[in-house]
Structure formats: C-alpha cells, structure tokens
Amino acid sequence: MIAVVKREATESQVKNLIGWFEKQGIRVNESKGEYCTVLGLIGDTTAIDIDLLQGLDIIESVTRISDPFKKANRKFHPEDTVVDIGGVKIGGGNFAVMAGPCSVESEEQIIETAKAVKAAGATLLRGGAFKPRTSPYDFQGLHEEGIRLLIKAREATGLPIVSEIMSPEQLPVFEDIDCLQVGARNMQNFDLLKALGKTKKPVLLKRGLSATLKELLMSAEYIMSEGNPNIILCERGIRTYETYTRNTFDVSAIAALKELSHLPVVADPSHATGKVSLIKPMSMAAIVSGADALEIEVHNCPKKALSDAAQQLTPDQFTDVMDAIGKARSII
C-alpha cells in the first residue's frame, strides 16, 4: 500500500502517522520528494481502512499495490535514485560509461587500457579479477592479484573501479573496490545478495540469463531489504533461440525497468551481443531507450585477450563508439 502525504503536512504530523502505522505492525518506507512525501507501507495491510486514511487532512491519496518488490518500486519512490560510485553519479539525469577489459591479465594491460578508456571519455573502469567461466579449464582470473592491479590502475587514472564479486566470503578482498558487480549467474545467489545488503557499497546487479524483470527486481529487493539502497540494474542480454549473437539484447527491458523502478539502469552491449560490430548500434539504442549508463568491454590488444576476445573493442574502436554515444545523447 502507498500513502501520498500532502505537501503542506508538517514533519510532526508525518511522524505521528508513521508511528501509528508501526503500531499496526506495518513497516514504513518514507520517500520525501519536492512536492510530496510518499509512504510505502510494507507488511499485512489488509486491516488498514483506506477510507479512514483518505479522510485524514494530510493524505493526498492511498493506493493498494500487488507488486512483491516494494523498496525497488517506483510507486514507493517516484523520484529517480542517484547512485554515487567514487564521485561518479549514475541516474537522475547523470550518465556514465564503464569500460575496461573482461579480465585483468597483467599490470601493463590494465593500466594501458585504463588510460585509453579515460582518454576516450569513460568515467569508470571495469575489469574482472574473479571470472566465472562455463568451462573449468578456461582462464578464471588473477583473483587477489587482479584486485591489486585494478587499484594500481585507479591510482594511475583516477577512475573508480567496477569488478565482479562471486561469494560473500570475498567481501574483505573487495573492501577497496568502488562498485561490486553481481554477474548474471549470481543474480539469485541470495546469500551473496543479503551480504551485499549489509554493506553500503554500490552494487551493479546484472539480469540473469533467463530472468524476468520481476525476478531481477526481487533480487534488488533482497539487497535493499538489508539496508543498502545503492543498486544499479543491468540489462546484459537474455538467452533465446537465436544463435547469431551471444545473447538477445532486450532493449525494451531498459524502458520497462525505468517505468517499474526508480533505480538506475545500465546496458551492457558487449555481453548482450558478443560481437564488436554490434556494440556501437546497440549502445545508441540503449541510450535512446533511456539507459543511465553503459558497460563496455575494451582491451588494449583483444587478439591476445584471455577471455571474450570477440566482444572486446580496441581503444580506437572504443573512441569511435564514444563519439557515437555523444551524438546519440545530444538528440534525446
């Protein structure tokens, strides 16, 4: 249930109303906007008399909702959430580009790539230190050494870091990482989600390979229910019957998530398509669809990449994509 409080209501009146709800066993999520305050009522609201609430002088409107995700719901929080990653803001009209290699492979590789993407206009550095791979024989990342190298790249460029975490036990290793990425395979790793909810670090939550939007938002709800509001949703393509592309890029999900939730939405055209040639047009499509950021894979020498070589741009190709992104953003 949602109760919208009139703009002229005093803080004391709102506080008293919240106290009354809590005495009924209802948890209240308060969202203060410019023109009104929205109270999201979480719990068994069947005993709450809507007519009684609507009769109060300070109540603008009351609505029952059936969506199971509450904290992530735009109805509970009409204004866009802005997530700050090391000084880089995403959401609420703030746009960012996360770029870097699929895997951290060496000091030279990550620092050279970091400098190149920053020069092209990227505002965040992405790179995998721990790599979940389909085959146990593929490169799994440099682990703690990879984290150390990412931090060196940040020192060299000033770019905040986005890197994937795979289990709650790894949290101490990621203490100096600016944004923790939850990969598609871990979207419903509920122990990990709850552990991330107990931190205040920004979390980039990727949609599962076959997950619905509701399932993605429920995963975000797991994190938010533990107290961490700093969630960024990511559309990275879903599995369909198509085999030409690595995944099927669900562009409509970007616009739909913006309707359903106040959380920022990122698009990952690299994993969505798996093809260098498609990253530029899909980046532009994502921007027109309302994406708050892009996550793009870039390698200083893709031919020598130890993972996902087919979808990693060269620095020159990334510069071209950034030019196209700038043009797309200028017309929306």
Image: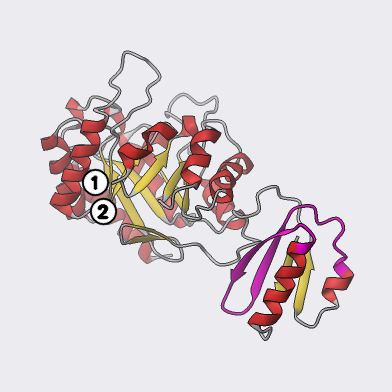
**Amino acid type of the residue tagged 1 in the rendering:** Phe
Q: Which residue is mark 1?
A: 318
Q: Residue at x 39, y 64 (%)?
A: 94
Q: Residue at x 23, y 53 (%)?
A: 159
Asked if the residue under mark 2 is in contact with the one under mark 1, i.e. CB atoms within 8 Å, the reply is: yes
Could you tell me which secondary element the residue under label 2 belongs to? loop
Residue 29 inside the magenta-drawn segment? yes
Q: How many marks?
A: 2
Front-most of residues 80 and 154:
154
- Badge 1 local density, few (<14 within 10 Å), some, or many (20+)? many
Q: Which residue is mark 2?
A: 122
Q: Image quadrant for the C terminus?
A: bottom left
Decide which of tag 1 and tag 2 comes sooner along the chain. 2
| Farthest top residue in view | 137
| Farthest left residue in view | 108
Q: Is residue 292 left or right of residue 22?
A: left
Front-most of residues 241 and 14:
14
Q: Residue at x 59, y 51 (%)?
A: 256
Q: Image quadrant for the N terminus?
A: bottom right
Could you tell me which secondary element the residue under label 1 belongs to? helix
- The residue range painted magenta reads 23-50
Q: Is residue 177 left or right of residue 68?
A: left
